[in-house]
Amino acid sequence: MNRLKVLFFVLLLCTCFPQVKAQEKKLPVDFYGHNFNLVTDGTLSAELTKDPSPAELKKEFTKLNTANYKPVLDSLLAYKAKYQLNDWLYYQLIRKVAQQLCPKENNYGNYTLYKWFILAKSGYDARLALSGHRMIFYVYNDEDISDIPFFDVDNRKYMCLNYHDYAQANLNEDPPVPVKIDIPEARNAFSYKVTRMPDVSPENYTERKLNFTYEHKEYHFNIRLNTAVKTIFANYPGVDFETYFNIPLSKETYSSLIPLLKKNTGKMDQKKGVDYLMRFTRYAFLYENDQENFGKEKRMSPEETLSSTYSDCDDRAALFFYLVKEIYNLPMIALLYPTHITMAVAFSKPVGEPIWYRGKIYSVCEATPETEDLPVGKLAANLKNVPYNIVYQYDPHY
């Protein structure tokens, strides 16, 4: 009878005073000048050793999968939807959250495991693999990406997301071995397309003065530049030309440059206006090839080119394309030579030596400094007999 009374008393206590859940708290994460509130109760926790085995990875995944990860995931996905983050920018946010959960320099394995887990739980087909002492992080991608390692599984291509952390490693000599962990919701492809830059707070902008001379008149520009752009694209891979050419400017940068260019070209006819934009792109920046500038091939987005002291032909081609598209929205093609890239524009009346492509006539517009002062419609002499490929066509009607 006494035991029954004790049991009744315990049940009564449980009813009146239910178990208290781990308290959720908000941790501010700086995302390019804006706070993202990481909502967590501390149960999302991993403890990998320095050199984890497949069995250890599976064990720590089970811990994460049974933890209260929903608040973290829900807050991330809500932020992604609210600010319309492309996949690449969403991944930058995930990197910052993983750094908050476990700093990369303290335990690289935990940091990578958090990134992989959050990305996979967000619906992306992400995979882990081990290569010697390295923990490799891949994601399914069906785009034309170059300069980073990948592997194929069942005709699906997986790109390495953390190769920059092992830049000196030769993964062909020690091929990564995938760790098989199935996450049913992780099925979507990851995209490297960036069609919208993040809304950066005003204090994250700097000003840069540019000037160039056009027809004996000097033009001055005071452009506001997003200081986060360099970080955003630090590990960005070599994407196809369509993706690369269509990376936009940040809002502040756009509003400090495009209206002024429109004003300067407002009284010019179309051909002269394009010539003005061509010479702005050609002469407002110093030239240096990527090997000298970065020690490797690197394509810069238009805003990176505006920010950089030096740039080469592909950087200028992308910037010129963006300016012509925004101000005149004319059809264009990109002509890729073995060691050079240039643009051609379809005017209402062709200028110079015509280039026929898919029913339109284009005129070359060289946006990179050459030994000759090339006008619209004229190709550099050293390229006249060199074969080229048309790697991108822009038609505003399609």
Image (spheres, helix red, strand yellow):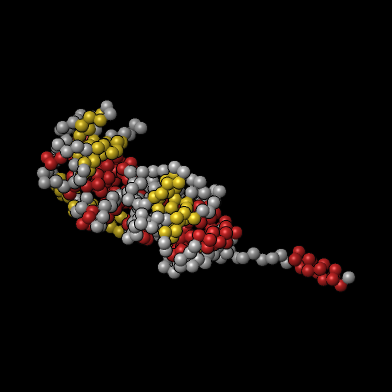
Most foreground residue, 152 or 391: 152
Most foreground residue, 388 or 89: 388
**Residue 176 found in image quarter:** bottom left
Q: Position of residue 364 (x, y in %)?
A: 19, 37
Q: Position of residue 82 (x, y in %)?
A: 48, 50
- In the picture, measured across the screen, residue 241 lies left or right of residue 133, that is left
For residue 287, say whether it is visible: yes
250 versus 204 height, above or below: above
For residue 38, say whether it is visible: no
**Quadrant in which the C terminus appears:** top left
In the orientation shown, which residue stands out farthest toward the bottom? Answer: 2
133 versus 395 height, above or below: below
Residue at image point 23% right, 41% down:
336
Q: Position of residue 267 (x, y in %)?
A: 21, 38
In the orientation shown, which residue stands out farthest toward the right? Answer: 1
- In the picture, measured across the screen, residue 66 lies left or right of residue 230, that is right
Most foreground residue, 345 or 254: 345
Residue at image point 78% right, 66% down:
11
- In the picture, measured across the screen, residue 40 lies left or right of residue 30, that is right
Count the marks: how many? Answer: 0
Q: Position of residue 387 (x, y in %)?
A: 19, 37
**Quadrant in which the N terminus appears:** bottom right
